Image (cartoon, rainbow, N blue to C red):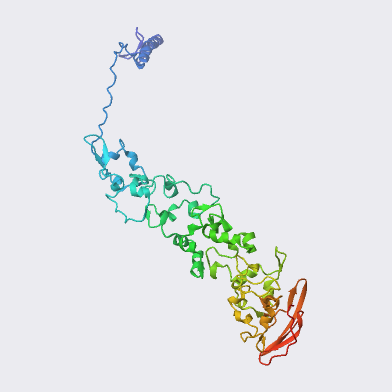
Amino acid sequence: MGIRANAHGQETTGGARRAVPTLAAIGAAIALGLLLLAAVAPRRAAAQQPAPAAAQPPAAAQPPAAPTPKMTPPATVGPNCTTGQCHAAIKASKFTHGPVNLNQCAPCHVPVGNKHEFQKTERGRALCLICHQAEAAKKVVHKPFGADCLLCHSPHGADNRYFIMGGLQAPGCLRCHTDPRKGLKMVHGPVAQGECLACHSPHQSDNAHLLTDSPTKLCLDCHVDFAATMAGAVSVHAPAKTDCAGCHNGHGGNNASFTFATGRSLCEKCHGDFLKKIDSFKYPHKVMTENKSCETCHSPHASKEQRLLTANNEELCFSCHDKTIQAKSGRTLPNIKELVTTSKYLHGPLQQKNCIACHQAHGSEYPNILEKAFPAAFYAPYAEHAYDLCWSCHDQKIVLAEHSTDTGFRNGDLNLHYLHVHREKGRSCRACHQEHASNQPVHIRSEVPFGRWTLKTEYSKTETGGGCTTGCHVHYDYDRKNPVKLPPLPVNQ
């Protein structure tokens, strides 16, 4: 069966006929399609663009916005007081007062009328005592504590547990009190750390200055070394027993140990009259006039010796008199310590280590700062009170009568003391006796100073008498039981 085309260009096969497009027809179809696409594309693009806003007529003037209605404060107190809208800051403290913590304002505040006005339920200290128990009254009351607790304490809370305004200890105290540290070179430990309550009660006390204990006990609770010294002491300074603040500033000072003054000036506060007397002495002790410090010899607190001496008085004296001393008078004082420690026989007071039995430690009206009268010169005619120092221990009878048995220095009953003393150029006791110590019995000198010459002396003692050889006279013996016949004695030599 052959294929053929009809007049319209359609192919036919056999009896059935099928259209076959020609090239011209295909080209015409393509051209028509392109024209249609060109017409449709702008419309599609236009359809995707937003429609332009329609023109609006001019806006009419609007009235101002109505204000937000103001909240009417409540006329009562309660949980709503500390909300974010009102007094929220009251609960912002690290520590809050119990009622505040429980949103309970009513214990302290009550409304006035039907308005947002409130007053305290009580005035001053009475307000706090609604809840807090009153303290038993004491002698000394801190003024704020007696008037109004709120002068020191915040009523709502604070960043410290006691609600102290300004802060605990010094920061709170210095809101009213002057800083005691100002102008001080040295500051007491508790004060330096701002620990006012280490010594003071914030409310009241039975002690002056609101001290937490009696002054001395308060100090000794910390200064335990002084407490131990005082406990074992023989003598304790009166201020140390009762009030350390008599000499020391409890806050600090510009002197060592915070004393109000130094040296003798501090002692004058109590011992002024006595020190004036010392200044008037005809023969002052050098240690008082040059060093001007009582502490050279005395402990200011306590001592194991009498009179607050820093050592036994002999030991104390030897701390200076352990060498030869040139006095202002021109006299040379011997090394007393060497004399005493190297001698066989000691004067009674020195056997007891008691220099002040004869000497006045501060000064005297008598030469050599003696306690009582004693002739300063080698030659001294006898007078009733000229030897008062000796008669403090010895019996005056030993020199009163030419014939007597009241002395051991006699030939029979001839009183040889009397013969030495009762003459125009009477010999003082020092002419024969060494007043401190000697290597010969009854303190007889081994040598006697006589101007720039030294007289040697030899003394021998027997059971009933003795003998003496000296530069003053030839050798003489004496015997109490069997009197020795003596040559005529010179009267005015």
The outermost residue toward the bottom is 482
* Horizontal side, residue 274 vs residue 15: left or right: right
Q: Quadrant of the C terminus?
A: bottom right
* Horizontal side, residue 412 vs residue 140: left or right: right
Q: Nearer the viewer, residue 249 or 411?
A: 411
The spot of residue 207 in percent (x, y) is: 40, 57
The outermost residue toward the top is 7
Against 145, residue 323 (above or below) is below
The spot of residue 454 in percent (x, y) is: 77, 75
Against 479, residue 28 (above or below) is above
* Quadrant of the rendered image containing residue 483: bottom right
Q: Nearer the viewer, residue 380 or 112?
A: 380
Q: Quadrant of the N terminus?
A: top left
> At x 55% / y 52%, what residue is drawn?
254
* Quadrant of the rendered image containing residue 402: bottom right
The spot of residue 284 in percent (x, y) is: 63, 63
> At x 78% / y 71%, what residue is drawn?
452
The spot of residue 352 in percent (x, y) is: 59, 77
* Horizontal side, residue 356 vs residue 240: left or right: right
> At x 65% / y 68%, what residue is drawn?
368
* Residue 212 appears anywhere in the view: yes
